[in-house]
Amino acid sequence: MNLGGPDMAPQTPQRSAREAVARRDPILTVSELQTHFFSFGGTRVVRAVDRVSFTLHEGETLGLVGESGSGKTTTCLSIVGLLPRAARTVGGSVVFEGEDLTRKSQRELRRIRGRRIAVILQDPMASLNPLFTIFRQVAEPAFFHQQLRGRTLRERVQHLLRAVRIPSPEWRMREYPHQMSGGMRQRIVGAIALAGGPRVVIADEPTTNLDVTIQAQYLDLLKDIQRETGVALIFVTHNLGIVAKMCDRVAVMYAGKIIEQAPVRELFDDPKHPYTRALLGSVPKLARFIRAARKRCHAA
Ligand SMILES: Nc1ncnc2c1ncn2[C@@H]1O[C@H](COP(=O)(O)OP(=O)(O)OP(=O)(O)O)[C@@H](O)[C@H]1O
Ligand SMILES: [Mg+2]
């Protein structure tokens, strides 16, 4: 008999699945991460990432949201050591599979990037080389990290292109990036990201340049791949609709800090921080908008 009260309520499958995930050790633990930009001569310092901490579990999607300039991209780039020249991680740790990535050399990080942790950036053209065929670019991680060659490599590339729903991969892989649509290019960047069989994918606004239908298809594709492979995702976006669709937990950044993080439902239902409330309040309420429009029609 259910005696009532929150503790006695039967657990929903989603809730128990989430709790099972939380009980396992995280794949990635970011603790007190600090990354600063230094001006020329070191006279000015921007604390782009200011003591950021979060964890990520297998198969989980963490949304990273916040206004422009709040430090989302710098957080992502700090994790994989891809910072621009002016920036340096000055404190904290990024523990991935038991090792602190902030202590690794660029050479060691290159072996981890692409194979164990993949990064998808906002502009697919920035990640693709216009001079190389799609085959060469998708094949690269499998060529270097898994030492695949010849027919096995060709089959692997076709398999990856098929996984991201590129039609006729046998001949599409001989083409160049400019021969593809924007949505296809973004999916090819996704195929490259998956080529090394990563455990974590960091996607920094991967759908901002796509129109809404292609965007929805791409998000569904990422979800399918996640279900099949158990890959964990860090998903940076400005779009709270995408957060609701994609993420299990969400971390809100403001001025280099994570000011609030919670399971998505909890954050949407009961935002604690005033900035989070303002962020949620800035989403147009469609139902309210339609009601107001109807009222205006009746009054006219
Ligand atoms: N190359 C740079 N030199 C100096 N400061 C920089 C540089 N790149 C970023 N910054 C600063 O670091 C802070 C964080 O920037 P970041 O790009 O991480 O923000 P973001 O949250 O990803 O923003 P957006 O939503 O616009 O992509 C900002 O204050 C920005 O001005
Ligand atoms: Mg950014």
Image (cartoon, helix red, strand yellow):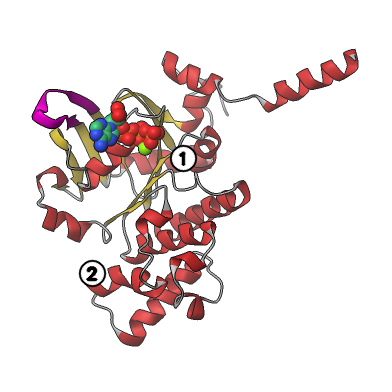
Q: Is residue 264 magenta?
A: no
Q: Which residues are magenta?
A: 33-49
State which tag comes first along the sequence, 1 or 2: 2
Characterize the local packing of mark 2: few (<14), some (14-19) or many (20 or more) Cα atoms within 10 angstroms: some
Q: Where is residue 274 drawn, in percent x and y? A: 43, 13
Kindly identify the amino acid type of the residue bearing the numbered disc 2. Answer: His
Q: Where is residue 129 drawn, in percent x and y? A: 35, 64
Q: Quadrant of residue 151?
A: bottom left
User: Which numbered dot is residue 145?
Assistant: 2
Q: Left of 20 or right of it: where is 38?
A: left
User: Which numbered dot is residue 268?
Assistant: none
* Predominant secondary structure, magenta span: strand
Q: Is residue 240 above or below residue 103?
A: above
Q: Quadrant of residue 196?
A: bottom left
Query: Nearest the camera: 11 or 108?
Result: 108
Kindly identify the amino acid type of the residue bearing the numbered disc 1. Answer: Cys
Q: Is residue 42 magenta?
A: yes
Q: SS for tag 2?
A: helix
User: Which numbered dot is residue 247?
Assistant: 1
